Amino acid sequence: MWTGKPVILWWMAAAGVFCFPPVSVWGQFTSGNAVAQLPTDYTNPRQDTIFIFNPETAKGSLSIAADNPTGDYEWYRYDHATKKFADTPFAVVSGATSQIDTLSAGGYMVKVQTLAARDSFVAWVYLNPGFQLDLRKNESGAVIYSYKTCEYTSFQLATPLKESSFEYYNPANPTDTRRYSLFNTVLFTVMDGKNNYVPVSWSSGQQFLRIWDPPYEDTRYTFTARDRFGVEDNDDILYETIVPHAIMDVQLPEKERLADGNETNPNSAPVEVRINSRSTKATEYSWRFGDGDSARYGGEYPPLPDAAITHTYTIPEEYTVSLRVTSAQGCQNTVTYKFRVDPSKLDVGNVFSPNSDGINDYFKPENTSIRQFEISIYTRAGKKVYQYKGNDLHHWIGWDGRVNGEKDAAEGIYYYVLRAIGWDNTDYGWRNKKNNNDTYRSYVYLYR
């Protein structure tokens, strides 16, 4: 890599190594404005050097000096048609050094003649043509609409950009007829407005660059192209999205503090779910609630309501709610949300103490997803002291230990008969085969 210092190439034609006269000359190529030097791919009988000049330098510049104080320097240009150096030099310079500042791309041989010896040296000059990065845009500086799809976005180069190459040959070995190439690759980097790198696909010579998975929001991209030798150009462009972003808020019932001090289970059936869309770039909305029901809004369907959509779930199982949104251009995006309705459960305790201390003051079975419930409570003598029947066990506080809601019941054992059916059709009654009643019978202790 070029370091800013003159690039130097030393050669010594030593006896028995190269086919030069026994008396040789030490010489060196230098260049004050080459950005890099690379060795040739050929090595037989020797390896030469390629000097690279970027576009800010219109022509190549090479200088050579011999180890003797003065000498004659004959410059020859390589002829690609004949695959050899010209017979006649295009420049002859006498002095301690020789420098040519107007070299075009190609190969050069310098024959050095001093009082003591004669030798020749070869170097190649590659003039990097550079490039200009110019993205085609509409009048507002944005991506042309026809280049946008739901899966990717194409960005057109106003001027096709092609990686350049430099061809050279092995002039000192007549049996080596291969054509060697130095390739100047170009790489693209793309950053969005948040300074995130964005993958881009492009091949040399193609007029379009492609970014997959377009963003959900308008984004300004900065494209930077940089070649192997540091030539760089950039351009920015606005992408106005056509892709909707499905955003769905699903709100389950909140826990409620009950009079008995316990909290409701928000996953206990029936569960009323509130669903709201905050989607962007959407014109049509399609919900699937996971229980076979669905709803559609927008387009040819009713407009999306401002208020949240409510849907009630009763059967205990896991559900997946999905929202698929469609943009005006037909692009779609889907989001899902999973939740469960708990299976039914009924646990009946056998003791409570209605003494208003806030601890176990009510006789109420722990329950989840119960659809129907009824209970009757009796004294040991068979007198009914309490009865409840309903399907809202969330807000039923239970028996408070009073006789039919009036005076306090005495301490002791009380018998109850209950029947409960879960939303999953589990029957919590105890089947009495004699009278075929689906009831559950047991007792509870009342302590003060």
Image (cartoon, rainbow, N blue to C red):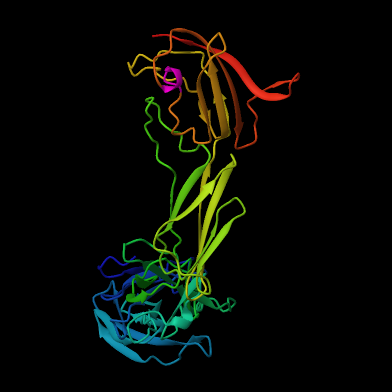
Q: Quadrant of the C terminus?
A: top left
**385 in relation to 421, above or below:** above
Residue at the image position 63 percent from the left and 26 percent from the top: 428
Indicate the quadrant containing the N terminus: top left, top right, bottom left or bottom right: bottom left
Does residue 158 lie above or below 6 as drawn? below
Q: Is residue 260 left or right of residue 385?
A: left
Q: Is residue 429 left or right of residue 115?
A: right
Q: Which residues are magenta?
A: 399-405
Residue drawn 49% across the image and 80% down it? 167
Residue furthest to the top in view is 412
Which of the 4 image quarters holds residue 32? bottom left
Position in image of residue 71 (x %, y %):
28, 81
Looking at the image, which is closer to me, 90 or 322? Answer: 322
Where, by quadrant of the figure, is residue 401 drawn?
top left
Viewer-proximal residue, 394 or 300?
394
- On the question of residue 45 being in view, the answer is no
Counting from the top left corner in percent of width and height, residue 213 is at 48, 66
Q: Position of residue 47 (x, y in %)?
A: 46, 69
Res 293 seen here: yes
Residue 378 lies in the magenta-colored region: no
x and y, in percent, of residue 372 in the image: 58, 34
